[in-house]
Image (spheres, helix red, strand yellow):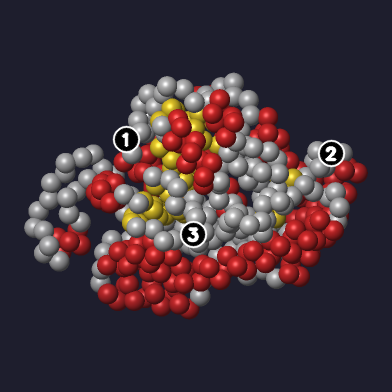
């Protein structure tokens, strides 16, 4: 079975974990610090704060930036539910914004502008599929409306421009992301005092960490603020250090596989619509090529296509069922209409993409997809 994504884990990861166990210190300590420094360096960022997931990093960032009850945060509905959930955790309200188009499924600036109210405090951008949003456009947008910019960069590890325009950018190291620590995340921030505040909030609001007290850098502590336990541990940091060394090579492999997909699917004609076809390889558009989304023709039912491809031993998934249509959100925030997001969510199919794949695998997926679309149209 060709899976949609597959992590690359080997002897180096295994020996890094053994080293941590042999060291006798497994919770947040020097390896987490080293991983933060390496990740910040790789992204030309000033400060990095490692956390136990991207979701907790999103919540931590919103909380540290003072977002809370009564505030509204503009956010795409075409994202993983964690993005919107993190806004609800603070007591603020997510205001869902449509995508620009089916071909360019990133946040629509015109729809965002139409949804700004006196309560709007921030925009939570998502670099969907790893394609980084237009930095100039969104920094100007934030300035004009006096809003805080935050980046959900879960898809965009290894893209240098990700993390450069938000007050905070949050990356994910979940098992299906471009690099993994099983569970884990990282926040990049430019502002030093914000970074310091985030470090404290990450560990219960304590004025010193367990490792610092163990190393007798502090004998007691105070708790001047309400914090969380969102710490990363040494095992995950050790995995992250190893994975980070391959990240740029892996992203380059993803780019080459994406290019092969685009060439083969374009040669097939009208089997599917290819989002980001114009952006792919265009000057100034950066991507980590996290996933390969396509849009099925409206007359080819998706369940039939997916079933047919499983028979060819090819797994596919959906990115994403729109957040505003998930039953919890329909119940709590009813009556939202986002025509482009809804059509995208209805027709989208995610094809396998990971650095361990070959061009032959890509060819096999495209042939299977073409046959499955023909079959599904016939069935419909
Ligand atoms: C994976 C993902 C998250 C959540 O990341 P975790 O590390 O699993 O908490 C958030 N946003 C997006 C867009 C994601 O893809």
Name the mark nearer the viewer: 2 or 3.
3
Graded by Cα atoms within 10 Å as few (under 14), some (14 to 19) or many (20 or more), the crowding at tag 2 reads few
Snapshot quadrant of residue 216: bottom left
Secondary structure of residue under mark 3:
loop
Going from N to C along the chain, the mark reached first, 2 or 1, is: 1
Q: Dot 1 lies on which element?
A: loop
The dot on residue 160 is 3
Callout 3–callout 1 Cβ contact below 8 Å: no
Residue 173 x %, y % = 47, 58
67, above or below 134, in the image: above
**Is residue 88 visible to the viewer in this orientation of the structure?**
no
Instruction: Examine the rendered structure and indicate whether residue 112 appears above or below residue 251.
Output: above
Q: Nearer the viewer, mark 2 or mark 1?
A: 1
Among numbered discs 2 and 3, the one appearing first in the sequence: 3
Q: How many marks?
A: 3
For the point 54% across and 41% down, the residue is 137
Residue 304 place in picture, x, y as percent: 80, 45
Classify the position of the N terminus by image quarter.
bottom right
Report if residue 90 is visible in the image. Answer: yes
| Of the image marks 3 and 1, the number of the one nearer the N terminus | 1
């Amino acid at each position: 079975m060709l899976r949609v994504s597959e992590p690359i884990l080997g002897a180096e990861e295994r020996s890094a974990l053994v080293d941590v166990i042999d060291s006798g210190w497994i919770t947040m300590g020097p390896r987490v610090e080293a991983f933060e420094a390496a990740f910040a360096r790789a992204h030309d960022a000033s400060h990095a704060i490692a956390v136990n997931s991207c979701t907790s990093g999103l919540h931590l960032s919103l909380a540290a930036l003072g977002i809370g009850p009564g505030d509204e945060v503009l956010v795409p509905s075409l994202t993983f539910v964690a993005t919107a959930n993190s806004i609800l955790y603070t007591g603020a309200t997510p205001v869902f914004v449509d995508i620009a188009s089916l071909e360019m499924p990133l946040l629509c600036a015109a729809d965002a502008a139409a949804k700004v109210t006196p309560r709007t405090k921030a925009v939570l951008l998502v670099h969907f599929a790893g394609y980084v949003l237009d930095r100039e456009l969104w920094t100007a947008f934030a300035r004009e409306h006096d809003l805080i910019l935050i980046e959900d960069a879960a898809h965009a590890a290894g893209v240098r421009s990700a993390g450069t325009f938000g007050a905070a950018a949050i990356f994910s190291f979940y098992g299906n992301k471009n690099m993994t620590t099983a569970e884990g995340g990282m926040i990049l921030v430019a502002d030093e005092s914000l970074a310091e505040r985030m470090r404290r909030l990450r560990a219960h609001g304590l004025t010193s960490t367990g490792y610092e007290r163990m190393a007798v850098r502090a004998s007691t502590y105070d708790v001047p603020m309400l914090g969380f336990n969102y710490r990363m541990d040494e095992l995950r940091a050790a995995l992250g250090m190893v994975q980070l060394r391959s990240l740029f090579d892996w992203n380059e492999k993803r780019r080459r596989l994406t290019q092969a997909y685009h060439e083969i699917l374009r040669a097939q004609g009208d089997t599917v619509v290819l989002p980001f076809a114009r952006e792919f390889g265009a000057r100034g558009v950066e991507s980590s090529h996290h996933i390969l989304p396509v849009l099925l023709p409206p007359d080819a039912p998706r369940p039939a296509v997916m079933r047919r491809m499983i028979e060819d031993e090819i797994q596919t998934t959906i990115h994403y069922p729109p957040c505003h249509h998930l039953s919890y959100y329909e119940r709590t925030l009813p009556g939202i209409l986002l025509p482009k997001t809804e059509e995208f969510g209805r027709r989208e199919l995610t094809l396998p993409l990971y650095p361990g794949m070959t061009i032959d695998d890509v060819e096999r997926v495209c042939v299977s997809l073409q046959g499955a679309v023909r079959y599904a149209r016939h069935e419909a």
